[in-house]
Amino acid sequence: MMRAVVIAAVCLASFAIGAQRFDAWIDDTDLPPLLSETSVEMRDRHGDLLRVYTVDNGRWRLGAGVAQVEPVYLKMLIAYEDKRFFQHRGVDPLAILRAVGQAIRNGRVVSGGSTLSMQVARLLEDSGTGRWHGKLRQVRVALALERRLSKEEILSLYLTHAPYGGNLEGARAAALAWFEKEPSRLTPAQAAMLVALPQSPEARRPDRDWRAASAARDRVLARAAEAGVITSEAHETARREPVPRARHAFPALAPHLTDRARAEEPLAERLQLTIDASLQSSLETLAQDSLRQMPGQVSIAIVVADYRNGEILASVGSASYGEASARQGFVDMTKALRSPGSTLKPLIYAMAFDGGLAHPETVIDDRPVAFGGYAPQNFDGQFRGEIRVSEALRQSLNIPVILLMDEIGPARFMSALRRAGVDAMVPGGKPGLAVALGGLGVTLEDMVGLYAGLARGGEAIDLKWKNGAAVTAGQQFVDRAAAWQVGHVLASLTPPGAKAEGRLAFKTGTSYGHRDAWAIGFDGRHVAGVWIGRPDGTPVPGAFGGDLAAPVLVEVFQRVKPELDPLGPPPPETLILSTSQLPQPLQRFRGRETVFKADAEAPVLAFPPDGARVPLEVGLPLVVKLRDGAPPFTVLANGAPVAIGAYQREIALEQVGKGFVTLSVIDARGRSARAAIRVD
């Protein structure tokens, strides 16, 4: 009753002190701040919410304007709270007289005389509903607000600040939390509940007392029907609609990327990213599912982009953001520097093709080599002898790519990486041949950008997360024919569990010590990368890119679209020939300083000679005889070592069985001899 009495007293005082002095009193009002902090909103490429941040006091307060709410909600609000809102100037004398009369007749407060403008004044100052001087202040602020703001602006303040239970403020926060939708799509029943909640937000919280919430909602619906806001049929239908009994969580998709976006633009209240919310949600679920059978310390990261325009469609920094666990989910592994293993090999081959050093059909040696104190080995410890370059790439052999790197030069390779947009970190600052096998640090996002450039015909492109940003094409880091040839070779591999439709050009990688498992690939439109490992860099025993990351990559593409887009045709200048048809210098790779150069002192297989058919009795070893060369000798049978460190020139081989056998002998200086025989 105090509220109505105070307001009535103010009205009488205005007559007593005179209109001029009363106007001056209102004009001299110091208004509270009208621009309150609202939650920062991150939206996806379609405008859907990705993530909402709370304001400093932990409240969800989303800005809302009249145009952002369902019109029937506004009509219900005005009909129930302040039906003469558009006629009065902050105080409604008729409502005051009615409230005073009802209070006198009933001996208690039946209804208040507070207008929406007065409620906004209370919300802005958080002044409560207590003593008379607080009411007087609300009246003064309401009158001042009406003079300085439009009715629509006052409504917007109410829609932003009204309490809806717990830490919810504003109609948009309430609609998202209680109904999981924007307030522009409210049903009449939902609109009525949002009208009823601010009157007693804690007592009527549907997650605490759904019966109280339902009863309050029904009173609003009844008033709306009486006022003609809704029809009687709509009234009855709305009353049968159940009220929610739990709050919905606010979206928190792409947490690492949204944190990065907010840090880069800290003053922005709303940012629209290139992310697709539906795909992002699907891949975050995939990331969580992929780690269920892995050790607790293992993390995962995924990046998907449209390489035509460089837009990042999904970015999963980890599978457990904000979770206090050994997975260290707070670390954004899309931006962490890691060893890429073999995933850099396609660039080396593309540079070799571009520079005329090799062709996919060029024959190259896969034999033991040494560069000073550096003696690279294949992952399985075996050697294949002579092999086509395309097959060396498909099998991800180490020695052929090191031979190409030695010819290209680590400095030129690092320059190409920079032109491709990869910001690599080399331990010690000076690159060596080991960078070809992952001896440097790169990020998953940069590696996805590198493969995007290969998919674009060797033209670099900057990946972007901000929606509407201009497409920034970079330099040509390899020619388009070389890029196509590499993609063509990678597309001839069969991904684990892949569907038959389309082709995926992909490469896996495993870093030294099984610390990182990679899989990166592209089709005719999209590029994606997967990294799996431990954020602290400790090994994951038995982790291989082909076993761990490749199946996830295939699943990523299946979630991006039902069928792969076909890869493009070769550029007109592409040289597509067999080995024998190639120009003589391209038929066999021989670097300027090749370790396989012919030498008068190279070892010779005196027995058995090339093409020989050797009878061998059961239980007896195959004896090979050597001439020239410098001991100790290594002997390989079909690429597998069968004698190591032999100083004699007549060597008995116990492990050689019957059938076709390729024998290779390498001396202490890396010089070799070879013979293909048949053992009977």
Image (tube, rainbow, N blue to C red):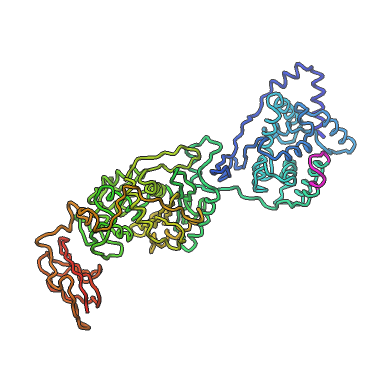
Horizontal side of residue 405 vs 84, given as left or right:
left
Residue 532, x across and y down, in percent? 42, 56
Residue 597, x across and y down, in percent? 15, 57
Q: Quadrant of the C terminus?
A: bottom left
> For the view shown, which residue lies furthest in the right direction?
105
- Give whichever of 240, 662 is nearer the camera: 662
Residue at x 78%, y 50% (from the top left corner): 237
Residue at x 69%, y 43% (from the top left corner): 164
Magenta highlight range? 226-235
Horizontal side of residue 650 vs 82, given as left or right:
left
Residue 168: tell me if it is visible: yes
- Give whichever of 626, 609 is nearer the camera: 609
- Give whichever of 586, 68 is nearer the camera: 586
Q: Is residue 19 above or below residue 62?
A: above
Q: Is residue 415 above or below residue 536?
A: above
Image quadrant in which you'd find residue 643: bottom left
Residue 40, x across and y down, in percent? 56, 39
Residue at x 23%, y 75% (from the top left corner): 656
- Give whichever of 398, 19 is nearer the camera: 398
Q: Is residue 663 magenta?
A: no
Residue 369, x across and y down, in percent? 21, 59
Image quadrant in which you'd find residue 48: top right
Q: Quadrant of the N terminus?
A: top right
Residue at x 26%, y 45% (from the top left corner): 411
